[in-house]
Amino acid sequence: MNQVRIIAGAWRRQLIKFPDSVGLRPTPDRVRETLFNWLGQDLTGRACLDLFAGSGALGFEAASRGAARVVMVERDAKVMAALKENARRLKMPTTVEFVATDALKYAVSCKTPFDVVFADPPYRQGWLARLEPALDTLLTPDGAFYAEAEFPVETLGAWTSARQGQAGQVYFHLLHSVQQEQEETGVAA
């Protein structure tokens, strides 16, 4: 079993254990720390979606930091079983939900928007481009879309990269709606 540590919040220093699975690469500690600095550390009251949950590092980190609701989507049964076992072992609240399905199917059928969506999909399969049409309904107007990719991402439809970084071969981005960016900078369309 592989493991990563939750880095902050109520479950700080607790281990998350996960099996080997093709394409599963947990977001490194340094990148998670940067991401949650960008988000403001405290996610109290926010609804978060971890679309390609994998190890659960992003979703469990959001729950640890007070998110009101965390939905973790994972299609691999073995990985999903590990996610549920981690939640049970850590005594995560019932505000953490697990959905065993394909990320794209969930994204296009989702009826309730989220404040923060995490997407760390398997590389070289075009997932971000396939998700792009669903972003406007998947996120609240002032929401944040976090994406990891093997290449830099400037825009995804009406969403633009507000923050970005690189760790080794991984590019990571925090995107906001173009409208939100214009409101924050005072630039009219």
Image (cartoon, rainbow, N blue to C red):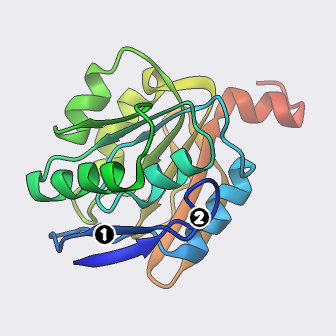
| In the rendered image, the vertical position of residue 91 relative to residue 141, given as above or below | below
Q: Is residue 126 visible?
A: no
Give whichever of 42, 26 is nearer the camera.
42
Badge 1 amino acid: Lys
Q: Residues within 10 Å of mark 1 (few under 14, many from 20)?
A: some
Q: Is residue 74 left or right of residue 38?
A: left
Residue drawn at the location 43% of the way across and 16% of the way down: 112
Which badge, 2 or 1, comes first in the chain's sequence?
2
Residue 111, percent across and down? 36, 14
Q: CA distance from mark 2 to mark 1?
A: 15 Å
Residue 166 % position (x, y): 57, 75
Q: Does 6 appear above or below 118?
A: below
Estimate the x, y position of residue 24 in percent, counting from the top left.
26, 68
Q: Give the secondary structure at mark 2.
A: loop
The residue most toward the right is 186
Please state if 130 lies on the left or on the right of 155 as rendered: left
Whether residue 106 appears in this view of the structure is yes
Q: Nearer the viewer, residue 103 or 15?
A: 15
Name the disc covering residue 12, or none: 2
Q: Is residue 158 left or right of residue 126?
A: right
Tell me the number on the disc at residue 91: none
Local packing at callout 2 (Cα closer than 10 Å; few below 14, some 14-19, many 20+) is few
Q: Residue at x 34, y 39 (%)?
A: 131
Q: Is residue 115 left or right of residue 82?
A: right
Residue at the left extreme of this rendering: 77
Please identify the quadrant where the N terminus is shown: bottom left
Residue 53 in percent (x, y) is at 32, 52
Q: Residue at x 86, y 31 (%)?
A: 187
The kind of residue tagged 2 is Arg
Q: On the image, numbered disc 1 is attached to which residue?
A: 17
